[in-house]
Image (spheres, rainbow, N blue to C red):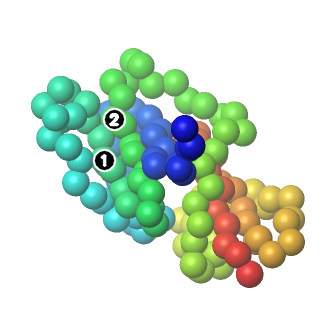
Amino acid sequence: MTILGLHHVQINVPASRAGEARRFFEELLGLQEMQRPDSLSNAGRNGVWYRCGGNEFHVFFAPDGEFKEDRSSRHPALLVDNLDELRGRLESEGVELEDAIPIDGRPRFFCRDPFGHRLEFLSFE
């Protein structure tokens, strides 16, 4: 048995803030929505899935009472083709950015989404 790769990452956001999640992930980050299986919606599992290169990024709309903000260092890292453009877009929207410890040939930075999740953005030089 061999693990072939990472297929998707899922985060939870409060259902009452689904519009805010969509704005952040679609308008600010530029993720493109993809079709979710009908079986999930039919089972009451609401959310949105995004294409993320060859992988997927899932956002589950959790019942508000079940959502718990996570301000830990856990995070997905999203590879981008223009790190400076994304940095500028996020800064212009007032998103607080955190510089990362430098890694040669891999510029990167972090931010928190509106729900407290830590996100890393990087590119390769």
Say which residue label 2 marks.
Answer: 61
Identify the residue at horizontal 34%, vertical 65% (top origin): 32
Image quadrant where one finds the C terminus: bottom right
Q: Nearer the viewer, residue 95 or 46?
A: 46
Identify the residue at horizontal 45%, vertical 25% (top origin): 67
Picture coordinates of residue 116 (x, y %)? Answer: 58, 40
Q: Visible in this render: residue 88?
A: no
Q: Which mark is residue 35?
A: none
Picture coordinates of residue 55 (x, y %)? Answer: 45, 57
Instruction: Estimate how packed mark 2 is, as few (under 14), some (14 to 19) or many (20 or more) residues with alpha carbons within 10 Å.
Output: many
Picture coordinates of residue 40 (x, y %)? Answer: 21, 34
Q: Which mark is residue 48?
A: 1
Q: Is residue 58 above or below residue 44?
A: below
Q: Is the C-beta separation of discs 2 and 1 under 8 Å?
A: yes
Amino acid found under the numbered disc labelled 2:
Phe
**Alpha-carbon distance for marks 2 and 1?**
8 Å
Q: Nearer the viewer, residue 38 or 96?
A: 38
Amino acid found under the numbered disc labelled 1:
Val
Identify the residue at horizontal 76%, vertical 71% (top origin): 107
